[in-house]
Amino acid sequence: MARKLLGLTCAAPRPQAGPVAPAEQLGWQLAIAERTFMNSTLYEAMDKTAALGLKYFSLSASVKLDGKTAVATANLTDEQIAAIKKHLDATGLKLVNAYVPLPGNEASCRKEFEFARKMGIDVLVGEPTEDALDTVEKLCKEYNIKVAIHDHPKGHSLYWNPEAVLAAIKGRGPLMGACADTGHWMRSGLDPVQCLKTLQGHVICLHFKDLSEKKPKGYDVPWGTGAGNCKGMMEELQRQGFHGAFCAEYEHFTGHLTPELAESVKFFDNTCAELVASTPR
């Protein structure tokens, strides 16, 4: 039976292939990045994610609790964290990661790891500068929390090219790796399938996107309808034995956001089923 949250009718659970859904058989989780619902409060974003029939959610560096003022996640009070956890439970959602600043100052960086510990998050996503990497590695080991280095487009990020991510994590162990933002690779003129191959064994999670074109002005479109070769990326991740979260993140306003996300969810589910069906038993 469908249920309602803040006036939204939640979709019935997505089809299962036997007792385990295809995505779960692959070790994959499909999440919505909170930033996708940029005009909504955090609680509305969680409700809209649940309404898509999903079970996973990703936090941004700051969240709107009341629709007015954004609060940095590291500055959330214990009471606010408890309220967020309660709403996650009510919507049946689990946090897979959070995008946070990762500064070189240990006290400031530790606040981000403390927030993750309190929220029960085991993956942080960010773009630490070179002088922050040793501090980040130290805290990864202390808290047993992974850090996935994220890429923004060329000219806006140290890590626009996967080779830069590999250089940053060289010799640092499995707690540090990549958050592969496939859309930003496309905006940098890179082939996302080849980028994934370059990062083999080091992808912790993804900001998974399909864009209208492989150019700086490319905008988000439903998965499988753009220039990104989404099926090819998923095939490559299966080949690598990747286990982790695909976070859907729209970065522009569209009046058709929910239908486009639903189309992406359908593409993801169907492709996962195809991949599982084609895997030798």
Image (cartoon, helix red, strand yellow):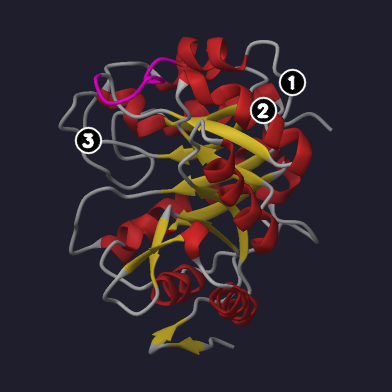
Q: Nearer the viewer, residue 192 or 20?
A: 192
| Kind of residue at disc 1 | Gly
Decide: is 236 above or below 264: above
Q: Main secondary structure of the magenta part?
A: loop
Q: Can see residue 271?
A: no
Looking at the rendered image, the quarter that the C terminus falls into is: top right
Q: Secondary structure at mark 3?
A: loop
User: The residue under label 3 is which amino acid type?
Assistant: Ser
Residue under pointer 2:
137
**Residue shown at 77%/39% (left/top)?**
142
Residue in the foreground of this view, choosing between 103 and 14: 103
The relative height of residue 154 versus residue 22 in the rendered view (above or below) is above
Would you say 128 lies left or right of 212 here?
Answer: right
Find disc 1 in the rendering and name its residue.
Answer: 173
Residue 66 image point, x, y percent: 35, 80
Residue stretch rendered in magenta on the structure: 155-161
Residue beneath label 3, please?
212
* CA–CA distance in space, label 2 to label 3: 36 Å
Counting from the top left corner in percent of width and height, residue 223 is at 38, 43
**Callout 2 amino acid:** Glu
Residue 197 location, quadrant: top right
